Image (cartoon, helix red, strand yellow):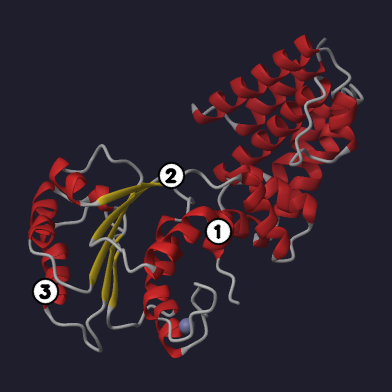
Amino acid sequence: MAKFLIDSLQPKLVAQFARIIDRKQLAQSYLFVGPKGAGKLELAEWIALRLFCQNVQDGAPCGECPECERILNHNHPDVMVLKTSTQSIKVDDIRNLKQEMSKTGVEGNRRVFIVEDADKMTAGAANSLLKFFEEPVPGMTVILTASSKNQLLPTILSRAQVITFQSPDRQAVIAKLEEDGANPQLARVAGRLTGNVSEAQELLTAEDFQDRVNRVFQLLDRLADHDPESFVRVQTQLLPVAKDAAAQRQVLALIGLAYADALNRHFEIAATQQLDIPAVAALAKLSSRQLTDDLQAILTAQVRLSQNVTFQSATEQLMLKLLEG
Ligand SMILES: [Zn+2]
């Protein structure tokens, strides 16, 4: 049986929609609301696969038949996804979509329309879409996705069935990365840095990610030893792997993860996702007061970095703080 990303991200919702579709109780329109990376678009696509698949097995689409293949390749005539790379979805975008909707299904009656980031719809666009809700077409399913309900017109909210997505369990994200062959330690780091499978996968394939993680781990060893050389390492070891803003944020975030894990470990709070490195075990021996102060200092460094203090300056200051006490 094919395994899709959404099976790891939202297994409960997948099971729920498998049952709904089995019972032919699929609503005319849904609004999927939840944070980025929660699998809203993936579930919408899974529903389309499930509806069109010619070889459904145990309630799941096969992912391999010609129908599934066309949907996965985004060229199925009866599955349309409206995405925008701009700030807003405008009336014309919806008008084009509605023109498509008014045609009968190209190959059957069933059609699925997906509007990604529906909260980007202008009021005009939303009003234009409302027409569809007022005159539903049999066999058509509309799925809107949005990160928040706040920007949506109440008239749309009242007509679509709202499904709320929780952030995927980090453990599920990490398990998925490992399943795809990632090194377990790196999978844990990447999964915790983003909490989002596709972003984590990007990290894992980025050229210098592993190098950056290793260098931060080495620095943590020095910090755990209270080695004053930690200060110099910012320039000699970290700068070369912290050239852009994203990499710089990662370095500080990773230091923060290690100290947070150390604090948990100090209190003997077991977490399966903890960084399994000697530095965390060593840092856990510091007092809880010290660790709390250290975490505060890391947060301060992160704030300073976001306020355009240079990475080198923010991180060197941080080293001085972490070496205190
Ligand atoms: Zn199929």
Image position, residue 294 (x, y; %): 72, 18
Q: Is residue 247 visible?
A: no
Q: Element type at marker 3? A: helix
Left or right: residue 287 versus residue 147 is right
**Disc 3 target residue:** 99
Task: Return the disc, 2 or 3, that comes first in the chain's sequence.
Answer: 2
Identify the residue at image location x=83%, y=12%.
287
Q: Nearer the viewer, residue 170 or 123?
A: 170
- The answer to whether the residue bearing label 3 lies less than 8 angstroms from the nearest atom of ligand 1 is no
Image position, residue 272 (x, y; %): 76, 41
Q: Element type at marker 2? A: loop
**Disc 2 target residue:** 35
Q: Nearer the viewer, residue 140 or 128?
A: 140
Neighbour tally class for label 2: few under 14, some 14-19, many 20 plus, Cα within 10 Å: some
**Disc 1 target residue:** 198
Left or right: residue 230 versus residue 163 is right
Check the image and report above or below for 64 versus 216.
below
Q: Nearer the viewer, mark 1 or mark 2?
A: 2
Badge 3 amino acid: Gln
